[in-house]
Amino acid sequence: MSTGEEAISGTVERVGRYRWVICALLFAATAINYVDRQMIGVLKPTLQAEFGWTESDFATIIFWFQLAYAIGYVGFGKIVDTLGARAGYTVAILIWTVSHMAHGLATSVTTFAMARFGLGVGEAGNFPAGIKAVTEWFPQRERAYAIGLFNAGANIGAILTPLLVPALVLAFSWRVAFYATGVFGIVWLIAWLALYRRPDQHPRVTAAELAYINQDPADPVEPLSWGRVATYRETWAYALGKFCIDPIWWFFLFWLPGYLFERYDMDLKTFGLPLAAIYLISDVGSIAGGWLSSRLIGKGWSANAARKLTMAICATCVLPIFFAQSISSVWGAVAVIGLATAAHQAFSANLYALPSDMFPRGAVGSVVGIGGTIGAIGGMGMALFTGYILDATGNNYSVLFAIAGSAYFVALALVHLLSPRLARVDAR
């Protein structure tokens, strides 16, 4: 090893790496979040057969989840800015785990919608608390990469669900599947309470790592009011970007299992591997998107140029989804849809980084909360529209894939129009 390499290695060793343990905890929470969230999509054909649901009935259940998510997101944004990531995450996972397990008691569209509403409230806390934790534990140059890593947990959860849940259903029942997967949240909460503190209060963080985390210029840590946060164009750059892309991810998450069932004549035993492959490809996108912009910033690019170039590349990669409906091969569809979901995750990792680029730490949770609420409102509309289109067209997805293919360029255009330089807000 050269002298220069030894110096670099020694610096890394002296700085410490405990912040990556925190990132691993956030990754695990996000994976559990998505197992709990996606189960309704994976079980859709089973539940439709048992309860006789139409596409509009299913859309109604999804609508109530997203309404709760919209309410919970903005609420948890404020909660985590006020109480911190540790307490905010604790409240969130308690609510979502109890609500998730309550699905096992549901017997109708109404009772499923009630359970989904509780799940939506709790799950809304995952990203405000997670991004707050990243803001506390990582310098700006590493944040998009850290967000990309923990956001990759969404894809791991989405991979595990179609592999684990059918096995539980076939061995026991769909009700037992909800109870069994609820245990993951309980185990994670025990680990979170044992391992998480703010870096300046954590006994495992060295002075060198703390200095590395705090290398960016100091900014106010006091929470800002929602009213004040909502006056900034930068808040709406983020929020309208979420409004465009979040409904597409919800569409993929909740309707892809049914699409594979119907389009390629699959069943509970055979659709798991193609669906898992789509989300495995997505995982690569999530990490690569965060890595690319962080790499560019490390080479001296501005955050503005690095984030937007990365998002433009991602938007381009979604375009082949226009042709998904016409692909006759299931694995051809997996490749095209997987590229689109990977591009979404890469785009999302960079979009999630914008609040910490533009706002002081005391406002990040609130900005993320407002953006998540606006995104969930878009998702509510997309859910009802999807149910209507599928019932009206005999389950033809062409219009829906066309919307998915164009949404990311619209999102990037809105971000650039409202914040052409991603200028940092002066919140003094």
Image: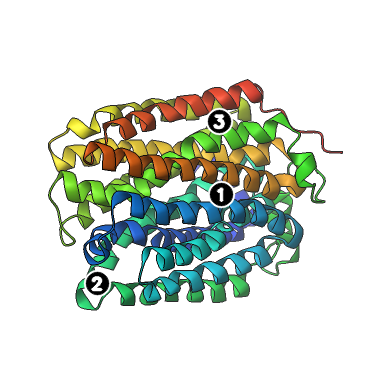
Q: Which residue is mark 3?
A: 307
Residue shown at 70%/59% (left/top)? 79
Residue beneath label 2, please?
169
Q: Which mark is residue 108?
A: none
* Foreground residue among 383 and 422: 383
301 is higher (above) or lower (below) than 375:
above
Looking at the image, residue 101 sits to the left or right of residue 14; the answer is: left
Q: Is residue 354 visible?
A: yes
Identify residue type, mark 1: Ser
Indicate which disc, 1 or 2, sits on the residue closer to the N terminus: 1
Q: Position of residue 69 (x, y in %)?
A: 54, 54
How many numbered circles does the render carry? 3
Mark 3 element type: helix
State the quadrant of the C terminus. Answer: top right
Q: Look at 51% across and 59% down and name the residue there.
A: 120
Residue 9 circle label? 1
Q: Amino acid at mark 2?
A: Val
Residue name at image x 58 percent, y 46 percent: 372
- Tell me: residue 6, above or below residue 89: above
Q: Can residue 217 be seen at all in this image of the molecule?
A: no
- 326, above or below 413, in the image: below
The crowding category of the residue bearing disc 2, from other C-alpha atoms within 10 Å (few below 14, some 14 to 19, many at least 20), is some
Callout 1–callout 3 Cβ contact below 8 Å: no
Q: Residue at x 46, y 67 (%)?
A: 115
